[in-house]
Image (tube, helix red, strand yellow):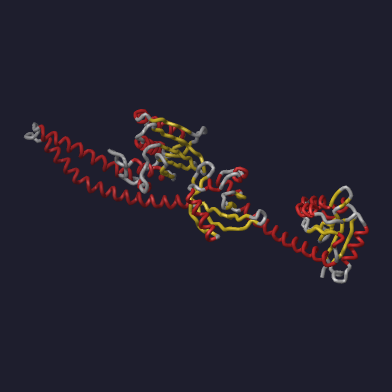
Amino acid sequence: MNRVKVLLIDDDEDDYIITKDILSHSSIANKYELSWIDSFEKGINAVLKSQHDIYLVDYRLGKHTGVDLVNEAVLSGIKEPIIILTGKGDYQIDEEAMNVGAADYLVKDKIDADTLDRSIRYALKQAETLKALKESENKFKIIFDKAKEPILISDFTGKIHDINKAGLDFFGYHIKEMLATNDRSLFYTQEDRDNFVQELETKGAVSDFECQMVSSKGQVYFCSLSSFLQIDLQNMVEVYHTIIHDLTYRKHQETKSIHESKFSISEHIAKGFAEEIRNPLSTINLVLHELSTDEMLVYNENLQAGLEIIKANFNSINQLTKNFVSSTENKPIVIQKTSIKTLIEEALVEISDLILGHRIVLEKHLLPTDLHLSIDKKQIKKALVNILANAVESMENYPKVLNVSTLNDSGYYSILVEDNGKGISNGLEHQIFEPFFTTKKDAEGLGLTEAERTVLAHKGNIVFKPQETGSLFIIQLPIN
């Protein structure tokens, strides 16, 4: 059995003799090997060399104290335990010693073999436990820092205790900003946060909790959260360890697949519908021509007036059929480098008469730095015009405000179109891009359908978000 190497740091040789005598007691004589150093400076040098298992340090060391030595040793990263010895009992010294990291505090005239043996054993055991915890903490820290997915440590109140680099990059915060932020602001809706906390507090752990989270720049992500509760022993508080899985790409792919299927079906139905309706329309058109050119009927004013009404409705049905087919067709994309800022300005010019006619206040917040995207300028501009016109026509009460802004985030250039119109009734949001769906009079309900198809064909996204007042459309176009 290896003997425990003990170093006594004390400027009084009599104390060394007394300590040696105590450790020579028959019950512990073979357990310890005692060495002695008589000054603060020598003691520091010896401690920094880490050649002993434990240190007994006198509180009085000339102009220094044992607490000074402990403090310097801890700051230097010494792992071996240090026990402070003093000539008299003093609670203040005891508390001071423990605060700087001493393993124990003993009064010299109360020390016997059993007391010193027990104190040394407990100190060594505690040091061993702390070393294991530190190693475990370091391993966790390495995993925490190097993890590619965001990891967030927070508590019930929303206080953020820590976040890894991947999390800072994901949410777009600096560490000081993040630690000053409440985790409620990271959830897109308060309802998601409440449900997450309730499930976590009830079960102690959560797996695959799906919700939406938002970055510092307002970028919304679809996420899956896996979290568990743990007691932070250092701060004695219950914390949530949460791994955030970004499902945005997967969601977009799923949505894209659904849209592609929907468009394929819509295109098939549209072409079949057009074929079915064109035959009777052609017959109606032929009969109208014969009736309008019949010499016996040409002077019948009432009949001719009725024929004109039928012709006008025939033309409306024919045009609506063409528009429906056009909105579901895959149009070839002619890619060219296009200034997105110029495109937005041109789209606003196209609807300027509409804006003036409705006496709308236009607010623009475009990014100062221009960007050139590889897009079909004509198609994207038409899609934007459709969305702008939709926003203008939805506003009924003054003041009417149209807000157009841009955002560059997460590989997408986003164009945000927000109005303060009547919005849309709850439960109808999923129909907003459906063919012929409209809440306006004398509208075909195909403009948004075609806009969505155009943006998705550019591998972008178009998002509709109902607001408390009005609506928000976001066109997201890939930068690369």
Q: Quadrant of residue 443?
A: top left
Residue drawn at the location 41% of the way across and 33% of the way down: 401
Residue 366 against residue 237 in the figure, above or below: above
Residue drawn at the location 36% of the way across and 49% of the way down: 427
Residue 372 against residue 460 in the figure, above or below: above
Name the residue nearer the viewer: 16 or 105.
Answer: 105
Coordinates of residue 382 in the picture (x, y in percent): 37, 37
Residue drawn at the location 50% of the way across and 56% of the way down: 209
* Direction left: furthest residue: 296
Residue drawn at the location 39% of the way across and 42% of the way down: 454
* Quarter that holds the N terminus: bottom right
Left or right of residue 288: residue 417: right
Coordinates of residue 395 in the picture (x, y in percent): 36, 35
Name the residue nearer the viewer: 363 or 250.
Answer: 363
* Residue 123 visible, this angle: yes
Left or right of residue 101: residue 260: left
Coordinates of residue 475 in the picture (x, y in percent): 43, 41
Coordinates of residue 58 in the picture (x, y in percent): 86, 55
Q: Quadrant of residue 459?
A: top left
Q: How many marks?
A: 0
* Residue 77 visible, this angle: no
